[in-house]
Amino acid sequence: MEALAAGEIFMFEAFRLDRRGLCRRDEHGAFVPVSIGTRALDALRVLIAANGDLVSKDEIMAAVWPGTVVEDNNLTVQIAALRRILDQGRADGSCIQTVAGRGYRFAAPVTQHAGDSAVSSTRVAVIGTRPPPPLSIVVLPFTNLSNDPDQEYFADGLTDDLSTDLSRIAGSFVIARGTAFTYKGKAVEGKQIGAELGVRYVLEGSVRRSGNRVRVNAQLIDAETDAHLWAERFDRGIGDLFALQDEITSRIAVELNLELIAAEAARPINHPDAVDYIFRGRAAQSKPPTRDNYAEAVGWFERALELDPRSADAQS
């Protein structure tokens, strides 16, 4: 079966399938990548592309294992793997029906979208009433602007370390590395990325090395408005590359911690919950240590406790 075209999306129940893989909608309405084997994913694409029609075992196996002779039980294993993922909590039987002696049929209703406009409409339909989770962010692969392709590992290392460091921020939701790297080398607007991944923020940057100096640029983008919220440039001597990488990523992570909290605190909300009040309390805490700022922080945390008395963050 041919690979899905860029922007082509299949939506069914709580799942989304595109050329990058399979995602499941979480409790916040954001789509989170699902860990699934390549063979199972290929089988799923074949079944969904059939539009509910029966697909023979031979057809599936020819698409999943092209030019290879394999035993039937290999397909059985992949179908079982798909069912374990797709049928969790499903009361109406399996998404994948077995037609004895003939093949399989995908039974769940599927909606197909194509092109950038479909991505936007999907976002409105799926997460328009349930916004992306607070502090949700994707760290896009930093671009290597150096003439030396060997510096690619340095740019990728910054991306990996930043994803790890940002995930340590309390309440953050960071898109996994594998998903983020599907955007490597592609010019995609922050709005589209936010819609496709269900995140509020996008961090992007570049690395340029010249002689014994290296320059790193980083910028934080609001995925909803495509506005730049923060930007910083780091100029350093090469020295120990690993030490330099640690220094830059830690600096960016610390500054982003404050910037993200401030951005969340400034975001208008119609129906605030405990998490919103906690972010406002943290933003007040980051201000200069005065009596008024301390009282403001305590006031926000007390309002959070009124909504959620069990909140450990608000209590602490």
Image (tube, rainbow, N blue to C red):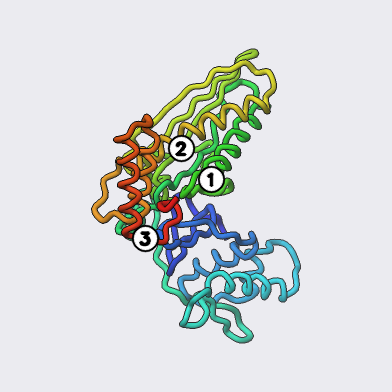
Q: Position of residue 313 (x, y in %)?
A: 44, 51
* Image-based side of 237 in relation to 139, left or right: right
Is 53 placed above or below 310 here?
Answer: below
Q: Position of residue 306 (x, y in %)?
A: 31, 58
Circle on res. 308:
3
Q: Quadrant of the N terminus?
A: bottom right
* Residue 70 x %, y %: 75, 69
Query: Mark 1, residues whose alpha carbon is within 10 Å: few (<14), some, or many (≥20)?
Result: some
CA–CA distance between discs 3 and 2? Answer: 24 Å
Cα distance between the residues tagged 3 and 1: 24 Å
- Three-letter amino acid code at disc 2? Asn
Residue sitting nearer the eye, 42 or 260: 260
Amino acid type at image mark 3: Asp
Crowding around mark 2 (Cα neighbors within 10 Å: few <14, some 14 to 19, many 20+) is some
Q: Badge 2 is on which residue?
A: 257
Location of residue 163 with respect to 269 vertically, above or below:
above
Amino acid carrying label 1: it is Ser
Residue beneath disc 1:
167
Which residue sits at x=44%, y=55%?
8
